[in-house]
Amino acid sequence: MAVVLLLAQTSNALADDPLESNPQPYRCEESVITKVGTYFENDPTSGFFAIFQSKLGVEQFPESYAAVVDRSAGANSALAKQKVGDKVQVCLIGSPPKDQYCNPDKDPRGRFFRVYSYRLKAAYVGTNANHLCGGA
């Protein structure tokens, strides 16, 4: 009975996710927010970031964790309202292709994530760095 209740609660939470109906196959995992802040310290007009207790998409980089940076996120965005300790579902929805400027095996930037916050019942999407793979 407890398993059925847990599945029902998870299903209800995901039903509120506006990206849930996207047919794209995602690599997803449950995670926790470990850090949230403004892109430039104490400047909410600079956008926001969140780091997750997950290595999804950046497993081969010892110092990297799954993250979302959104320079256009305002103070009322779901990203800005996240708190350390919030439980989230993190999904890797895209990685950069290898080309003459980008080698994703050596550059962890440019991964695209979709994050669903269980506390906020809201989803957001973003890259894990302000500059993409091979960028500045």
Image (cartoon, helix red, strand yellow):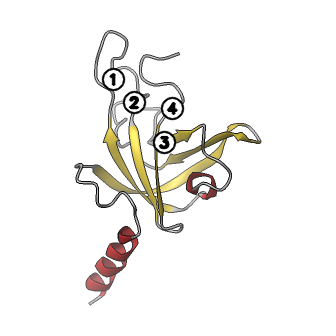
Mark 1, residues whose alpha carbon is within 10 Å: few (<14), some, or many (≥20)?
some
Mark 3 vs 4, N-terminal side: 3
Q: Give the residue at mark 4.
A: 129
In this orientation, which residue lies closer to the viewer: 20 or 59?
20
Kind of residue at disc 2: Phe
Mark 2 vs 1, N-terminal side: 2
Kind of residue at disc 4: Ala
Measure the C-alpha gap from mark 2 to mark 1.
11 Å
Mark 4 vs 1, N-terminal side: 1
Measure the C-alpha gap from mark 4 to mark 1.
13 Å
In this orientation, which residue lies closer to the viewer: 76 or 67?
76
Mark 1 vs 3, N-terminal side: 3
Dot 3 lies on which element? strand
Measure the C-alpha gap from mark 2 to mark 3.
13 Å
Q: Give the residue at mark 3.
A: 67
Q: Give the residue at mark 2.
A: 61
Q: Give the residue at mark 1.
A: 104
Callouts 2 and 3 close, C-beta under 8 Å: no
Measure the C-alpha gap from mark 4 to mark 2.
14 Å
Mark 2, residues whose alpha carbon is within 10 Å: few (<14), some, or many (≥20)?
few
